[in-house]
């Protein structure tokens, strides 16, 4: 799914939530799954910022299909650089079976913080 362009202010909390559903609108059960949200430069797979269900920042709603992503301020603090120009993001869900699904992809802009 193509996602929106996210705007993040350097060193601030950023988050979003979504419900993964099928074509009929029924939520997809993600019980037992893991998730990863990653931001990379436009031209490489070097990780600029990320959060996961294993470490921090992503909560899954099981049978409701809800995914809540919260990127902590420390993940972007002091990072405003040219690497962020045209940066892209992806949210993936991995089932215990090893099946991996890309739920959301798009671009992200990091603005310098003023405080």
Image: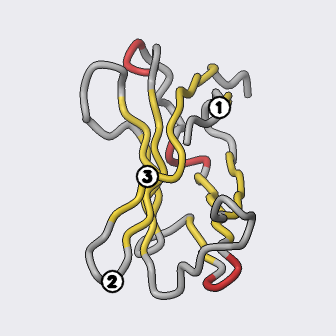
Q: Quadrant of the N terminus?
A: top right
- In the picture, which quadrant includes the C terminus? top right
Q: Is residue 71 left or right of residue 66?
A: left
Q: Residue at x 72, y 64 (%)?
A: 24
Name the residue beneath numbered marker 2. Answer: 96
> Seen in the image, is 99 located left or right of residue 85?
left
Residue 75 percent across, percent down from the top left:
50, 46
- The front one of 54 and 23 is 23
Q: Position of residue 37 (x, y in %)?
A: 47, 52
**As displayed, is residue 39 above or below residue 61?**
above
Residue 102: % across, % down? 43, 52
* Residue placed under numbered mark 3 in the picture: 102
Estimate the x, y position of residue 56 in percent, counting from the top left: 50, 68
Residue projecting furthest to the front = 24
Question: Alpha carbon of mark 2 to alpha carbon of mark 1: how far?
Answer: 29 Å
Q: Name the secondary structure under disc 2.
A: loop
Circle nearer the N terminus (2, 1): 1
Q: Which residue is mark 1?
A: 6
- In the rendered structure, which disc, 3 or 1, sits on the residue that comes first in sequence? 1
Q: Up-down: is 13 above or below 55?
A: above
Q: Residues within 10 Å of mark 1 (few under 14, many from 20)?
A: some
**Which residue lies at the image location 62% right of the left edge and 59% below the top edge?**
69
Q: Residue at x 28, y 19 (%)?
A: 43
């Amino acid at each position: 799914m193509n996602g929106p362009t996210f705007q993040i202010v350097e060193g601030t909390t950023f988050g979003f939530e979504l419900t993964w559903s099928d074509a009929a609108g029924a939520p997809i059960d993600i019980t037992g799954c893991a998730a990863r949200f990653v931001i990379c430069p436009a031209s490489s797979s070097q990780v600029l910022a990320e959060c996961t269900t294993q470490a921090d920042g992503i909560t899954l709603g099981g049978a409701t299909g809800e995914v809540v992503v919260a990127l902590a301020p420390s993940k972007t603090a002091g990072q405003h650089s040219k690497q962020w120009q045209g940066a892209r993001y992806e949210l993936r869900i991995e089932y215990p079976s090893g099946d991996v699904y890309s739920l959301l992809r798009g671009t992200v802009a990091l603005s310098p913080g003023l405080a």
